[in-house]
Structures are given as C-alpha cells and as structure tokens.
Image (cartoon, helix red, strand yellow):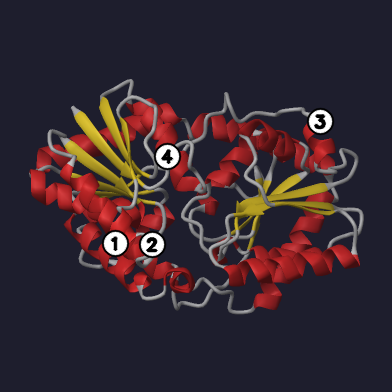
Amino acid sequence: MRIDLLTKEYPPHIYGGAGVHVTELVRSLRSLDEVFVRCFGAPRDEPDVTGYEVPTEYLSANPSVQTLAVDLLMAQDCGGASLVHSHTWYANEAGRLAQQLHAIPHVITAHSLEPLRPWKAEQLGGGYRLSSDIEKRSFESANAVIAVSAGMRNDILRCYPHLDPNRVHVVHNGIDTEVWKPTTDAVTLAKWGISENQPTIVFVGRITRQKGLPYLLAAVRDLPREVQVVLCAGAPDTPEIMAEVQSAVAQLQKERGGVIWIEEHLPQPQLASILSAATVFVCPSIYEPLGIVNLEAMACGIPVVGTSTGGIPEVVVDGETGWLVPIDQVLDGTGTPTSPDTFVADLARILTLAVSDPAEAAKRGAAARVRAQTHFSWVEIAQKTRHVYLDALASG
C-alpha cells in the first residue's frame, strides 16, 4: 500500500505540533507501508519526500491563495497512491482534489479547526473565509477524519454536523520517550541565564491567541518573587500579538526578576534540558486539541499545569501527573474565558501551589513520564492510523 502524506510542515521546517506529529508518524508508518511525503517549501534531500514552493506568479497573493496554488501541484502528483492523508487545512484541498482526480480515499487528521480559531482572520484577512471553506468541504467529503483527542472529535461533530460520526475516529498524538527524556545540560541553562536553584515554570509555544500566553503573563504578577519563569515563545501569528507580548514581558521584567524570554526555535536537546530543569510546565491554552508540548514535558519527567479544555484533560491526569486549571469559556468559537480575571487568578493560584511543594511536583513528574511511555507510543499510533486507512479503503 502506498500512502501519500500531504502536509505544510516537514523537517527541517517545523513550527508547530502538526509538523511534529507528521514527522513521527511518517517514521513509524514506513516500517509498515510505502510512504511518500508531499510538503510545502524547498526541495528536500530525504528519499520519497517532495517539497513544493509557491509558484512565482503567486508570491504576492493572499496566503490562502498561495496555499491553493501549492495544493494543485501536490494533487496532480498523487497519481499511483493507494490513499492520501492530509494534515491541516493547508493540505486538505490537495487531499480533496487528489481524491477526486485519482479516485482514491482521502483521510484527514484534524489538528485544529478553523471555526474555533476566528483570530486567524488577523493573520489571513479575507483568506480566513477561504481557509474555513476549504476545511469544511474537505471534511465533509473525506472518507475518514482522525481527531487527535475525544475533545477534538466532539468539536468536529459540533462544527460539521453533517459528518457521519462513524467516519470520525480518535487517534491521539504521541511522543518518542527515547528522544524526549530527562536531560541535564548546564551549558544550555547557563547560556540562557536559567538558574538551577530556583522553583521554575516553563512555557513552550507559538505566540498565537490559542496558546493563552497573555493570560499567563498576567498570572505571573501574582507568583512568588522567587519563582523563575522561562518563556520559549516565538513564531508570532501577527505583528500585533507579538507587540502585545513584547510589551507585557518588558513590563514584567521591570517589576520582577527571573522572567526569561527565548524567542528562537531551540534544538530538541536544548529544549529537553530546559524542560527537565523545570519544577512544572505550564500550558495556559484556551484552545488545544491535544498539545504535544504537554507530552514533551511529561516525557522529560515534568508535571503539567494545564487548562481544563480541549484534549488537555486526556493527557494530564489532575492530581496524578499534574494540575488542571478550571475555565468557563464563551461559546462564540474564540475560547475566551467568560471571566478572564477568574481564569488568571486560578492559573496563578495553581501554579503557586505546584511550585511550592517540589516533592509533590517531582512525584507527579515521575508519574507523567510513565504515562507518556505507556499511553502515547508512536508505534501504537501508527498502527491505529493504519487501521483507519484500511477502513477507508474498504468503504471506498
């Protein structure tokens, strides 16, 4: 069986969880089947991987139009595949067109949903309407849709009520616990000015509305002064949200010490060492289908303080592998807390509780690594994904 996997992100150009998912899934699937990868960007050196750059005549177009131009090239090249598997709206149209052009099944993995990310209009302008339409048409015509959590499956069926629930499957994200593991690297910590002797909270994520970074920055004001906060945050969606974060961080750094902002994308070993040095990891997302960053922290033996939303409660076991922060959200697709002040206060309170008892944090961190090892293996996830492929092929 030949699988053509369609994606925007693929090494060396990865900036989010979808790219991590695709990379690990491909590695595991290749032990089972023939896998061709079709990705956005420059040519790759890896065998059976083709990069597609935006055609010259579209370089000044809206990003959504550029995406469609690449998708047309991808779809044309999928002839001979048994099945196509697309990831994110960027590649969904390529999958839908290949499905029709070559009469083959189309499987989608949903890493997020456009209707639940209305702030993307800040980034795409009118292209957000286009990306939303692409996603809707692709989901409704796909032979199978994979949700990365049960919470995400519920969101899919709520956003796209015409979908047959039997075509929507849950296959979690995974983690390689041989790569992500407790790591000691004093050189990296010293490079970034990270103290090994202070209670430490680490955040890792893109600067986008869904990651909830402004709420975390507000909560930091209420943390004990001895707590060190490390923000591994970059790749902003828009200049406006970047400016908002820059202002908030600058103000915090005037008010207190121990606020460290690392904007650059760190190599995995360095990031693992920063995670391993933390007391707790924080995931203040207001929209999070699962959150691979939570698995990365858990695999490094660090407990997670995460918002009780989306797929996070399926990863973080409250009271066992971390702490969940309650949130009541507006039902308008934005995920905005109904009371931002309450959410910020709860986040600050639970973070303070977590860092104030290092023995309990260490206990939950050890349990977190065991959970990552036993419940989120990429080998198992590849096998579950392949079962979805076989069902899609059987149903035609």
- Say which amino acid is labelled 1: Glu
The residue labelled by disc 4 is 10
Crowding near the residue tagged with mark 3, few <14, some 14–19, many ≥20 C-alpha atoms within 10 Å: few
Tag shown at residue 135: 1
Q: Secondary structure at mark 4?
A: loop
- Say which amino acid is labelled 3: Val
Q: Secondary structure at mark 3?
A: helix
Residue most extreme to the front: 56
The residue labelled by disc 3 is 187
Above or below 50: residue 17: below
Tag shown at residue 113: 2
Q: Secondary structure at mark 2?
A: loop
Q: Position of residue 133 (x, y in %)?
A: 27, 68
Of marks 3 and 2, which one's residue comes earlier in the chain? 2
Foreground label between 1 and 3: 3
Mark 3 and mark 1 in contact (Cβ < 8 Å)? no
**Between marks 1 and 4, how big is the CA–CA gap?**
20 Å
Q: Position of residue 283 (x, y in %)?
A: 63, 54
- Say which amino acid is labelled 4: Tyr
**Between marks 4 and 3, how big is the CA–CA gap?**
29 Å
Of marks 4 and 3, which one's residue comes earlier in the chain? 4
